[in-house]
Image (tube, rainbow, N blue to C red):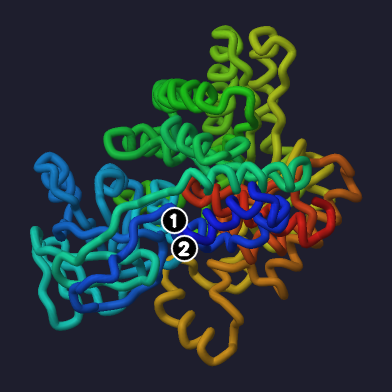
Amino acid sequence: MTSSVIAAVQAAESGELDRTEAVLGVAPDEVEHLLHAKMTDGPSAPVAAHGVAASPGAASGRVCLSVDAVLDADDDGVPAVFVRPFTTPADEVAMSAAAAIITAKGGMASHAAVIARGWGIPAVVGVETLVVDVAAGVARLGDVQLRDGDPITVDGSSGAIMLGAAEVGEVDIPDDLFTLLEWADELRAGRLAVRANADDAFSARLARQFGASGVGLCRTEHMFLGERLPLIQRAITDGSPAALLALADAQVEDLTELLEAMDGLPVTVRLLDPPLHEFLPDHPDLAEQNPMLGVRGARLGVLRPELYRAQAAAVAEAAARRVEAGGDPQVQIMVPLVVGGPELAHVRVAVTEELAGFESRLAGRSIPVGAMIETPRSALAAAEIADCADFMSVGTNDLTQMTFGFCRDDIEAKIMRPYVEHGLLEANPFETLDETGVGRLVSDAVAAARVAQPQIEIGVCGEHGGDPASIALLATAGVDYVSCSPHRVPVARLAAAHAVIASGSG
């Protein structure tokens, strides 16, 4: 794989190819292959199970069935493979320290998959033969019993899980790759930008190193993990001025650092969108029959406007601090899970009232307020939403879930393989954008929004923004940018150039 990148660059530098031909001569999938560790060609351990290949790369380590086990392994300097039934925000302190992740449930858009891709951690999810008994501290992979400390290997690129320690190669990225990506950037300049989904300064810096031209999605609920989880829980359940102040103060520090990391580049901060079953599992009074369709996103902003007011103030305070430090913050606020124009206009009142108090400290800068298009209705109502929004961004993970009626957390492991094998679907719609249904909604939404507001900026911030085939569809739809996990940014840069060239506008 390395030779194709090197050969393309050398051929262009020698005059055998022009830069466009060199860029087109390398498949985006080859870039992804270069960025992650992979299994060697030597002897390997036997494959014990397969699941959804949720995050590429390979790693060997010892089985860890609890957060404490992962942290102990990290203290010992031993790679940990975090094995869980599924993951929640409370697990993220362990996920960040793990060498790989395995879950019994989940799919490409599940919590474990999204977080693993964002942090560049190999992950296999939706392993149907895996049963984890957390209380007993034991798991079963088919007929095999797993305990803390057992050796195991994960190949997140193929979805394979191997018992024992297999040989994993080192990552070796040739300098020619960066040259090729610079040429790709030149070919797509002004047509299709590539931003990153980043929730903290570390991820933002990594994304910038990988060539991202901004942050297309900062999920603020992801700032409240581990020891911080009680902050968001109190803000939702209590809502007292003290609880809201603590929530805002914590975000001011994080957002200031993130804006510094992306100084001069756009940063889209999404207001709270916490599925209550993930963030408040111990509050049965808030339990919902279908939490992913429950009180989250803009609905939370309507019922609890003080939450969004506190967040808007935190965003503005962070931007003001950067201005006062001589920085160039280009921040904007996004309201999630919007279903219509009147709803966005209602939520926007509370947000803009808070922002108005910071005008003098922002030195003439405005903070745009936009909408996230994640439901079929919001796609169909794009024109009326555009009338109330400064920008729009399509969240294709939720849009795919709601359009198909597929639960993104567990349906992939159950039906996706037979559906693809029997030709009932061309591909897993959580991996590659569905052209017939979801793709049409995106295209129609973009067209309708541009009729209402011709200059409105429209992006895509679902994980489809890192998939080459999806990027080609999104370029045809006319979006201004795609946003994906930091580790997928190089892939998206090349894929975006291919799409622009194919459209004849490069």
Q: Is 471 above or below relative to 202? A: below
User: Which residue shows up at 26% across the image and 78% down it?
Assistant: 49
- Relative placement, left or right, of 306 versus 250 is right
User: Which residue shows up at 13% across the image and 50% down it?
Assistant: 69
Assign a secondary structure to mark 2: loop
- Relative placement, left or right, of 80 versus 123 is left
For marks 2 and 1, the one nearer the N-term is 2
Does residue 398 show up?
no
Q: Is 98 above or below relative to 42? A: above
Does residue 256 show up?
yes
Assign a secondary structure to mark 1: helix
Between 36 and 119, the one lying in front of the other is 36
Between 177 and 36, the one lying in front of the other is 177
Q: Which residue is mark 1?
A: 34
Q: Which residue is mark 2?
A: 1
As drawn, the residue found furthest toward the bottom would be 422
Between 166 and 476, the one lying in front of the other is 166
- Relative placement, left or right, of 385 versus 433 is right
